[in-house]
Image (tube, grey):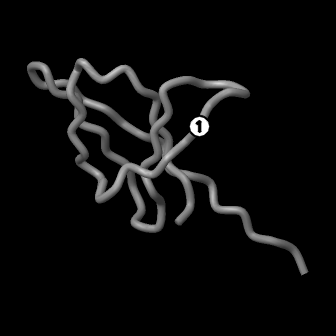
Amino acid sequence: MSDIVATPPKINFSRSGSDVTLTWDGTSFNLETSAKLGTGASWSVVSGATSGYKVSEHVNNYYRTAKV
């Protein structure tokens, strides 16, 4: 028996004025954020975020999707 690994969906973004909107396909993935990448990264779930999530342009974070 082998494990099935779900590939996280790609995050798309669009900009309108000072907002950036993040969209992705699928409902069984959380949006996560971190202030940095690499070995010191600390990822946390963006509470209540769904596809179409708006981010202020003044937020300097990284985003990814992760299986629920």
Can you give x and y, in whole percent of width and height, for residue 25 in the image? 39, 55
Asked which quadrant contains residue 11, the reply is top left
Q: Which residue is mark 1?
A: 42
Q: Quarter of the image holding residue 53?
A: top left
Q: Secondary structure at mark 1?
A: loop
Q: Is 13 on the left or on the right of 33, as rendered?
A: left
Residue most toward the bottom? 1
30 horizontally vs 67: left or right:
left
- Look at the picture and state if 21 lies above or below 25: above
Q: Could you tell me which residue is drawn at 34 percent across and 56 percent down? A: 47
Q: Position of residue 52 (x, y in %)?
A: 23, 48
**Number of marks drawn:** 1
Residue at horizontal 67%, vertical 27%? Answer: 40
Among all residues in the image, which is located at the extreme left?
17
Residue 32 pos. (x, y %): 46, 46
Q: Position of residue 29 (x, y in %)?
A: 47, 60
Which quarter of the rendered picture does the N terminus lie within? bottom right
Q: Vertically, is 48 above or below 62? A: below
In the figure, 38 relative to 27: above or below? above
